Structures are given as structure tokens and as C-alpha cells.
């Protein structure tokens, strides 16, 4: 899909958010209740696929090299980071690319990313659910078979976010730093060089937008608008590996606008 810059200066929040249903990567009905005592299932990450197939390139996410080590990162930010991967996976599945979605949805239980899970069992993390979901996607199961698992995964991530009870402004700030770092890795010289990172950046923007929605105050509306505009800089049919990406400079400029609004809420 061709990228078209969108900067709707002067729109009110209601107008800017009109018609966003198709862009909400974490939509869908709630799933089964999470099991707080569920064991964390660890599985080896599959071999890294090529950038064109939406792989993450293997190893720890590139953007995390610029952030605190996962073992020292506060749990609410680790959950926000994990949530971004899940949001990307859900969007890709619903965009008709289960092969690209599987790796992102495996992220929460991958051995490579085990440090992210420290301390989240007690918050209700359902590891076996994500293992089964990734396996079913990789096996090519039908939408009817997999949709309940997608909804349950979405609900489980939202439960973790709620139970983490962290600082939403700090989470959004962290997600914005991570988003732009990942995007710069994913998009090089105007083309998608690493589809996994390009897709993760989308997921982080969606999670930040959803956190802002939960603030629910008049003061937070400008922040929500800027985050919605950021999400809309990816194609409306999802962050597919063959997308035409927005220029890095435009994503960076929009992230700066988000950070400006964040500064007004501190």
C-alpha cells in the first residue's frame, strides 16, 4: 500500500479519531480469564526469518540496546515492551499474514526474551496460551480456530498492564523511545530493511495510544490525538512486510510531537 503523509492540523480530537476501528490492533472480544498460577512455558525461538518475511532478525530486540537491561527495567515497562510485540502480531494476523504474526506472538515465551518475564507470573501471565497460539498460527490453522486464542492473548496482555499498575506517562515515554529506535532499524534509505523491527515499532505506537486512551481526561486528549496520528502513519491494513513505509524523519517528527504533549502532563 502506498504511504500517504497525514498531518491533520486543526482537527478536533473527535474528528481525528473518527473511523479508527480498522486500526486498532488489539481489538476483539475478551478471552478466557488468565490463570495467575500458570507456569511460564519457554520454547526456543524459531530460526530468524528474512526481513521480507517479518522476522525479528534473531537475538534481543535491536532497540533495547539503547535502553536499560531487561533485568533492571521496571516490570510495567517490560510489560509495555512485550505488549508491543503482541499488538504487532495481532495486527499482522488480522491483516492476513499469520506467517509474519507467529514470531511476534511467540516473543512473550521465547527463551531469547526470558528476562522480560521476570516477576510477571504473579500478575497473571499465561505463557502456555502464547505457545499454543504461535504453534497454531505457524501450522496454518483457520481463522475460526485461532480467533478465540487471539482474543485470549489480547485479554491476558491487558490484564498484565492493569495489574502492573505503573506510571502511564513513563510507559508512553519509554514506548516512544523504543518506537523510533526500532523504526530506524526497520526502515533504511526509504525501504523496509528489517520487517520485524518496522512491525514492532507499529506495535509500540498502538500500545502507547491505548495507554493514552485509558487516561481519559480532557488534558490527555491532545496526547491521544498525536498518538493516533502516529499509528496512522503505518498502512491502514497493517504493518505488512511489503508495505511502503513512512520516512524515518516523519515518524521522528511525530514522536517529537507526542513527547511535547507528554511534557505538558508531567
Image (cartoon, grey):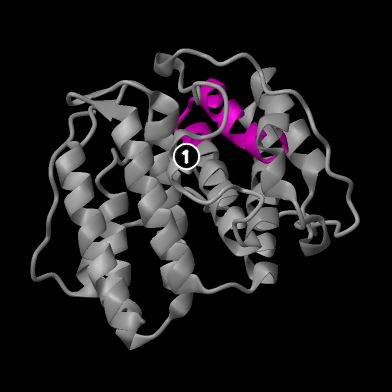
- Rendered residue at 67%/47% (across/down): 116
Residue 72 point in image, percent of width and height: 63, 55
Q: Residue at x 12, y 44 (%)?
A: 5
Q: 264 above or below 150? A: below
Q: Residue furthest left?
A: 10
Q: Which image quadrant is residue 172 in?
A: bottom left
Residue 97 x, y percent position in the rendering = 49, 25
Residue linked to disc 1: 65
Query: How far from the left and from the top, in percent, is residue 12?
Result: 18, 75
**Magenta residue span:** 92-109
x 45%, y 28%: residue? 196
Residue count near mark 1 (Cα–Cα under 10 Å), binned few <14, some 14–19, many ≥20:
few
Examine the structure image and report whether residue 93 is included in the region drawn in magenta: yes
Q: Residue 93 versus residue 183: which sits nearer the camera? A: 183
Q: Is residue 15 above or below residue 239?
A: below
Q: Classify residue 73 by image quadrant.
A: bottom right
- Residue at the location (29% across, 76% down)? 263
> 164 and 20: which one is in front?
164
Q: Is residue 34 left or right of residue 249?
A: right
Residue 184 within the magenta-colored segment of the rendering: no
Please give left or right for residue 51 compared with residue 248 in the image.
Answer: right
Say if residue 36 shows up in the picture: yes
Q: Main secondary structure of the magenta part?
A: helix
Between 172 and 215, the residue placed more toward the observer is 172
Q: How many marks?
A: 1
Q: Seen from this angle, which residue lies furthest bottom?
A: 218
Amino acid at each position: 500500500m502506498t504511504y500517504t503523509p497525514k498531518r491533520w492540523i486543526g482537527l478536533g480530537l473527535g474528528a481525528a479519531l473518527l473511523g479508527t476501528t480498522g486500526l486498532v490492533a488489539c481489538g476483539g472480544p475478551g478471552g478466557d480469564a488468565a490463570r495467575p498460577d500458570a507456569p511460564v512455558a519457554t520454547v526456543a525461538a524459531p530460526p530468524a526469518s528474512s526481513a521480507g518475511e517479518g522476522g525479528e532478525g534473531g537475538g534481543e530486540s535491536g532497540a533495547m540496546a539503547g535502553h536499560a537491561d531487561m533485568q533492571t527495567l521496571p516490570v510495567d515497562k517490560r510489560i509495555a515492551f512485550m505488549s508491543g510485540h503482541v499488538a504487532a502480531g495481532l495486527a499482522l494476523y488480522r491483516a492476513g499474514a499469520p506467517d509474519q504474526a507467529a514470531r511476534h506472538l511467540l516473543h512473550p515465551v521465547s527463551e531469547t526474551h526470558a528476562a522480560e518475564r521476570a516477576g510477571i507470573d504473579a500478575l497473571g501471565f499465561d505463557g502456555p496460551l502464547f505457545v499454543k497460539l504461535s504453534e497454531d498460527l505457524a501450522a496454518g490453522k483457520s481463522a475460526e480456530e485461532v480467533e478465540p486464542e487471539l482474543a485470549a492473548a489480547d485479554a491476558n496482555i491487558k490484564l498484565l498492564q492493569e495489574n502492573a499498575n505503573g506510571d502511564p506517562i513513563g510507559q508512553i515515554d519509554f514506548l516512544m523511545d523504543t518506537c523510533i529506535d526500532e523504526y530506524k532499524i526497520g526502515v533504511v534509505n526509504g525501504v523496509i530493511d528489517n520487517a520485524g523491527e518496522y512491525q514492532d515499532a507499529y506495535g509500540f505506537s498502538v500500545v502507547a495510544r491505548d495507554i493514552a486512551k485509558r487516561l481519559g481526561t480532557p488534558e490527555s486528549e491532545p496526547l491521544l490525538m498525536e498518538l493516533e496520528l502516529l499509528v496512522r502513519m503505518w498502512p491502514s491494513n497493517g504493518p505488512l512486510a511489503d508495505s511502503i513505509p513512512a520516512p524515518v524523519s516523519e515518524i521522528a517528527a511525530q514522536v517529537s510531537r507526542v513527547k511535547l504533549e507528554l511534557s505538558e502532563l508531567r
